Image (spheres, rainbow, N blue to C red):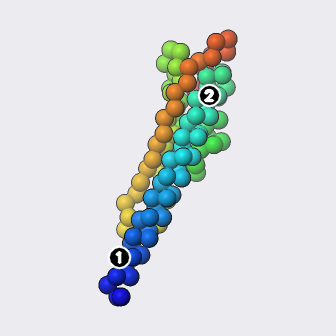
Amino acid sequence: MAAGLPALMLLLFAGLTAVEAVTTKAGCLDAAREAALAAARGESGSTAGSRHAPPGADVSVTVAGDRVTVTVRAPVRSFGARLPRLSVSATAVAAVEPGSPGPLP
């Protein structure tokens, strides 16, 4: 029992960190989609992405021709001091809508 309990706790912390990573990844994907669509409509993509992004996320908007690419990176909160630090990212691409004033980063 004394040898198995630390291993069980480590497994629990790793599982909770994995769930947090998946949740953060979903939040990054949602923020990237919203930012790409906003920038394609001529609104500020960085502002829209920051509103939907997880805490501590970095939103980068790139405009190349008629396409807008948004990448959102966020750190994952780990449960346990000995577990490695993780960072997840998501990318979304949108075409510039015709008749819009032009994409804004």
- At 37% across and 68% down in the image, what residue appears? 82
Residue 8 position in % (x across, y down): 39, 76
Give the crowd class for mark 1: few <14, some 14-19, many >=20 residues within 10 Å. Answer: few
Q: Is residue 93 left or right of residue 9?
A: right
Q: Evaluate whether residue 90 shows in this view.
A: yes
Which type of secondary structure does the marked residue at label 2 adopt?
helix
Give x and y (percent) for residue 70: 52, 31
Three-letter code, disc 1: Ala
> Mark 2 packing: few (<14 Cα in 10 Å), some, or many (20+)?
many
Q: Is residue 83 left or right of residue 46?
A: left
Mark 2 to mark 1 CA distance (whole Å): 45 Å
For badge 2, the amino acid type reads Leu
Residue 26, horizontal then vertical, whole percent: 54, 46
Q: Which residue is labeled 1 in the image?
A: 7
The correct choice, above or below, for 50 with respect to 56 in the image is above
Q: Give whichever of discs 2 and 1 has the lower sequence position.
A: 1
**Which mark identifies residue 37?**
2
Q: Secondary structure at mark 1?
A: helix
Residue farthest to the bottom, as pictured: 2
